[in-house]
Image (cartoon, grey):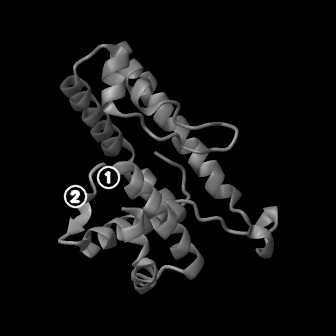
């Protein structure tokens, strides 16, 4: 089988080049394709079209390998920040930070008034609202994970979390909009 595939080596490279693949990467992918097909295809009749290799099958294999490589490589975009000048500390709006801290304190105080079940479930789902060290808002956990950990029904948790979001939205929507609009009066 490998001999029949190797006969069309230049065609495989051309296929990848037509997809926009660079020459060196194309050579690597073609070699990987040989290994993959040798490992996965047990009966060479499965990739033959008459007496010749099914070129469309190989093309789809190469295209999928190339797209997978491009997708994997594009997940992590590194930016060299050495060229950027960072602004001095006084440029940052301390009023914005103070408003944000005060708004979070108001939200935490509001949550403290809730019942034990609601507070516990809210904390399980949303985690800590703010990490005091770097002021990053933690991302919520999945409803399924909370349901499993709390040994509660998924629909019950979904209804409760939706209710929490509505309560907080009703109470603090205007303040949050003021924060994003940079209207830093005192939160209600």
Q: Residue at x 80, y 70 (%)?
A: 82
Viewer-proximal residue, 42 or 125?
42
Please tell me the numbered disc located at residue 46.
2
Q: Can residue 115 be seen in this view?
A: no
Q: In this view, does 101 lie above or below 59?
A: above
For residue 181, side relative to residue 37 (left or right): right
Q: Is disc 2 surrounded by few (<14), some (14 to 19) or many (20+) residues within 10 Å?
A: few
Query: Which structural element holds mark 2?
Result: helix
Query: Which structural element holds mark 1?
Result: loop
Residue 91 in the image: state x and y as whole percent: 75, 67
Q: Can residue 74 be seen in this view?
A: yes
Viewer-proximal residue, 167 or 73?
73
Residue 2 in the image: state x and y as whole percent: 41, 63
Q: Quadrant of the N terminus?
A: bottom left
Q: What residue is shown with label 1?
A: 41
Viewer-proximal residue, 1 or 132?
1
Q: Which of marks 1 and 2 is nearer the N terminus?
A: 1
Q: Residue at x 49, y 67 (%)?
A: 29
Viewer-proximal residue, 69 or 82?
69
Q: Is disc 1 surrounded by few (<14), some (14 to 19) or many (20+) residues within 10 Å?
A: few
Q: Residue at x 56, y 58 (%)?
A: 184
Residue 55 in the image: state x and y as whole percent: 28, 75
Q: Is residue 100 above or below residue 95?
A: above
Q: In this view, does 172 lie above or below 183?
A: above
Please tell me the numbered disc located at residue 187.
none
Q: How many labels does the image show?
A: 2
Residue 15 in the image: state x and y as whole percent: 39, 81
Q: Residue at x 23, y 66 (%)?
A: 48
Residue 4, by quadrant, is bottom left
3D distance between C-alphas at marks 1 and 2: 7 Å
Residue 86, by quadrant, is bottom right
- Contact, mark 1 vs mark 2 (Cβ under 8 Å): yes
């Amino acid at each position: 089988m490998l001999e029949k595939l190797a006969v069309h080596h230049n065609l495989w490279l051309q296929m990848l080049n037509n997809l926009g693949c660079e020459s060196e990467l194309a050579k690597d992918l073609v070699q990987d394709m040989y290994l993959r097909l040798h490992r996965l295809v047990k009966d060479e009749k499965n990739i033959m079209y008459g007496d010749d290799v099914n070129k469309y099958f190989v093309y789809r294999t190469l295209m999928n390998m190339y797209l997978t490589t491009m997708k994997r490589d594009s997940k992590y975009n590194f930016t060299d920040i050495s060229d950027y000048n960072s602004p001095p500390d006084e440029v940052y709006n301390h009023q914005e930070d103070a408003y944000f801290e005060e708004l979070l304190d108001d939200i935490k105080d509001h949550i403290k008034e809730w019942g034990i079940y609601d507070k516990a479930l809210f904390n399980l789902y949303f985690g800590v609202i703010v990490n005091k060290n770097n002021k990053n808002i933690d991302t919520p956990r999945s409803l399924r994970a909370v349901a499993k950990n709390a040994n509660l029904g998924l629909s019950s948790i979904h209804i409760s979390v939706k209710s929490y979001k509505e309560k907080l939205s009703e109470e603090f929507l205007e303040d949050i909009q003021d924060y994003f609009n940079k209207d830093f009066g005192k939160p209600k």
